[in-house]
Image (tube, rainbow, N blue to C red):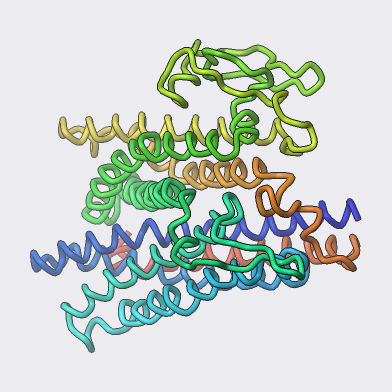
């Protein structure tokens, strides 16, 4: 039973982490495509229309791979997590169905026009389609995050005679207080990913010496957007999301900070290694009293440590929660510093000549994916041992008669299949880049 639970958790973790590589890019690119299409349409500037067409193709490929990799996750609710589905299906099924029926169909329908209908439907409807794709992708994220928010902070439910939970109020479910900061932080992270990828592509063009006009546009747009979104990631969205954790899931907050003992005037850990034997941090570098101030706006405020809670309610891998959280925060700080410097060089008129900065932009493009993955690891691992916080434990949500051999076999199968899909995606994107007008000259 224990091995089966581990394999099922690993399988879902791998499939959802791989799947989310695609939606975070499409959600971020959706906003940037609206910007490019708006400049092209309202200013009658064909350069921006051509730039938008390039990213629309990237969006289309990424969207398709996101759909393919996302479908198996829904089947896992039945194959690996049948008890969770039986227990909470009347609630999570509502938001998942709304995502499919409303947001997904809105996004996919207008994406067809965006990809294939520019000449047939004209520039006005093509611009409108970019706006609808943006709204559809962000609405889709809202319904998905409403599902996760309920698992993090259950609201609007009652328990039936059969032991399952039932929805009391749909509006209360969709306005769950947890979702406000979660949604803003998640979407800001998606915009950061899209902006870094766009800036990285532009830096690649400039450093390679071809498509320099597109390269300048992509770098300018990506750097400006990334600088703003990186700031918003830290404050207010990151700050609000962290405060929310301490309000509703204080044991997760203590694990994130590696705080074992309750402290008044708790310090903010910059570096250190959790020692689970001594319940201390080894080699700590701490800003005194800053955790208390950031969490409760008082330097002397008390912050509860892990030892304040029963050990069976602790996350089952505290070091991994701690390191994932600090990787996310550390990378977020680096993002802001990198793009602020690039924005300063742009203001001074030196960005496009500073090859070292263009290399930094290019090489930093993958890191938002790492930061986002670390953020979701923090959120989900920190919620353990609960699959529905305070109501249903993860060990109680698995399919009863699933064997560890079955779970391991499908895990290995997904690893192989998604590896092939990843290579196919990179090949498809490279074909779009190579087919840009003018590339054949080089």
Quarter of the image with the C terminus is bottom left
Q: Name the residue at 16% across, 30% down.
A: 348
Q: Name the residue at 49% across, 29% down.
A: 330
> In the drawing, does residue 303 fall left or right of residue 440?
right
Residue pushed farthest left? 43
Please state the horizontal and vertical placement of residue 251, each as a whole percent of the image: 65, 33
Please state the horizontal and vertical placement of residue 428, each as a whole percent of the image: 49, 68
> Can residue 235 be seen in the rendering of this structure?
yes
Q: Name the residue at 50% across, 21% down.
A: 291
Near-viewer residue (290 or 373): 290
| In the image, residue 149 above or below residue 314 | below
Quarter of the image with the N terminus is bottom right
Near-viewer residue (101 or 59): 101
| In the image, residue 206 above or below residue 18 | above
Please state the horizontal and vertical placement of residue 174, each as a whole percent of the image: 45, 62
Near-viewer residue (134 or 380): 380
Please state the horizontal and vertical placement of residue 119, each as a whole percent of the image: 22, 85
Near-viewer residue (261 or 1): 261
> In the drawing, does residue 180 fall left or right of residue 206?
right
Residue pushed farthest front? 161
């Amino acid at each position: 039973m224990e091995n089966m639970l581990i394999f099922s958790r690993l399988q879902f973790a791998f499939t959802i982490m791989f799947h989310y590589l695609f939606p975070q890019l499409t959600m971020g690119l959706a906003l940037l495509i609206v910007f490019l299409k708006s400049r092209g349409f309202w200013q009658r500037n064909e350069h921006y229309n051509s730039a938008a067409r390039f990213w629309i193709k990237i969006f289309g490929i990424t969207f398709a791979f996101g759909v393919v990799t996302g479908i198996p996750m829904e089947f896992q609710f039945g194959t690996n997590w049948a008890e969770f589905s039986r227990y909470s299906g009347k609630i999570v099924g509502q938001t998942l169905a709304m995502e499919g029926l409303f947001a997904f169909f809105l996004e996919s329908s207008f994406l067809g026009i965006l990809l294939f209908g520019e000449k047939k439907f004209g520039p006005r409807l093509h611009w409108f389609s970019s706006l609808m794709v943006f709204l559809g992708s962000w609405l889709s994220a809202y319904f998905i995050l409403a599902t996760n928010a309920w698992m993090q902070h259950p609201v609007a439910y009652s328990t039936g005679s059969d032991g399952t939970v039932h929805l009391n109020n749909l509006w209360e479910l969709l306005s769950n207080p947890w979702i406000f900061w979660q949604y803003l932080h998640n979407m800001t992270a998606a915009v950061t990913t899209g902006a870094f990828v766009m800036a990285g592509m532009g830096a690649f063009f400039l450093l390679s010496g071809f498509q320099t006009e597109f390269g300048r546009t992509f770098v300018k747009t990506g750097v400006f957007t990334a600088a703003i979104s990186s700031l918003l990631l830290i404050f207010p969205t990151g700050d609000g999301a962290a405060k929310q954790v301490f309000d509703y899931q204080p044991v997760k907050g203590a694990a994130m900070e590696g705080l074992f003992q309750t402290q008044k005037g708790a310090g903010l850990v910059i570096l250190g290694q959790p020692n689970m034997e001594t319940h201390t941090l080894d080699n700590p570098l701490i800003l005194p009293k800053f955790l208390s101030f950031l969490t409760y706006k008082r330097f002397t405020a008390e912050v509860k440590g892990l030892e304040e809670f029963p050990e069976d309610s602790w996350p089952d891998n505290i070091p991994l929660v701690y390191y994932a959280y600090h990787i996310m925060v550390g990378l977020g700080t680096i993002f802001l510093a990198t793009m602020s410097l690039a924005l300063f060089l742009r203001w001074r008129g030196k960005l496009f000549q500073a090859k070292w900065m263009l290399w930094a932009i290019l090489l930093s493009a993958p890191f938002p994916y790492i930061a986002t993955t670390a953020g979701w690891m923090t959120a989900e691992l920190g919620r353990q041992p609960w699959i529905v916080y305070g109501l249903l434990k993860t060990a109680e949500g698995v399919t009863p008669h699933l064997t560890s051999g079955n779970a391991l076999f499908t895990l290995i199968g997904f690893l192989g299949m998604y590896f092939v899909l990843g290579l196919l995606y990179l090949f498809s994107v490279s074909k779009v880049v190579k087919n840009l007008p003018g590339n054949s000259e080089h």
